[in-house]
Amino acid sequence: MKPQELNIECEVFDELREKLNAVINSLISAMIEKNLTTGSVGAKIGIELYKHTDEKTGELLYLPEFKPDVSMKVGAKGKVECSKVTGMIMMKGQGRNYFVGSNQIDIEELLAEEKEGA
């Protein structure tokens, strides 16, 4: 994953957004099928933050692990868990603009970069 600003649109939360969309549609279908007028969908992101010191540079790095899940309630509760996602947190500038990335880039990212450069 290339470094990118940490926000709900970043690659880290792709699966969460995809599953949230699916659960919203599933909830609406269940409400119609059961003739219900209310239901709810929730998204939760658990975060664990680990400190790591780079052995070569001595730089302190923060390694987050994101544990998202999506839940819904219509009559009975249901829950869809997402995969854990890990990366590295980087801070840009003096503000609180955090970026997340990994030290590995997959082949799709390389092909996309090559296409953009052409």
Image (cartoon, helix red, strand yellow):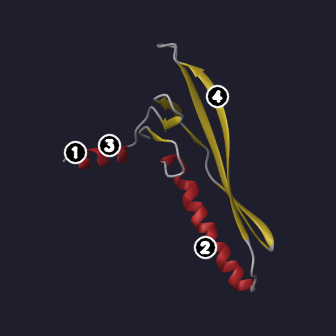
Disc number placed over residue 81 in the picture, else none? none
Image quadrant occupied by the N terminus: top left
Of badges 2 and 3, nearer the viewer stands 2
Q: CA distance from mark 1 to mark 4?
A: 36 Å
Q: Which of the two discs, 4 and 3, labels the residue nearer the N terminus?
A: 4
Contact flag, marks 4 and 2 (Cβ < 8 Å): no
Q: CA distance from mark 1 to mark 2?
A: 38 Å
Q: CA distance from mark 4 to mark 3?
A: 28 Å
Three-letter amino acid code at the position of disc 2: Asn
Three-letter amino acid code at the position of disc 1: Gly
Contact flag, marks 1 and 3 (Cβ < 8 Å): no
Of badges 4 and 3, nearer the viewer stands 4
Q: Residue at x 18, y 48 (%)?
A: 118
Look at mark 1 in the image and give the residue it sits on. 117
Q: Check disc 2 and report its element: helix, strand or loop.
A: helix
Image coordinates of residue 51 in percent, x first then y, are: 62, 24
Q: CA distance from mark 2 to mark 3?
A: 34 Å
Q: Is residue 78 above or below residue 85?
A: below
Q: Which of the two discs, 1 and 3, labels the residue nearer the N terminus?
A: 3
Q: Which of the two discs, 2 and 3, labels the residue nearer the N terminus?
A: 2
Disc number placed over residue 25 in the picture, else none? 2
Along the viewing direction, whichever of 99 and 112 lies nearer the viewer? 99
Three-letter amino acid code at the position of disc 3: Leu
Of badges 1 and 3, nearer the viewer stands 1
Callout 3 crowding tier (Cα within 10 Å): few <14, some 14–19, many ≥20: few
Disc number placed over residue 110 in the picture, else none? 3
Q: Which of the two discs, 1 and 4, labels the residue nearer the N terminus?
A: 4
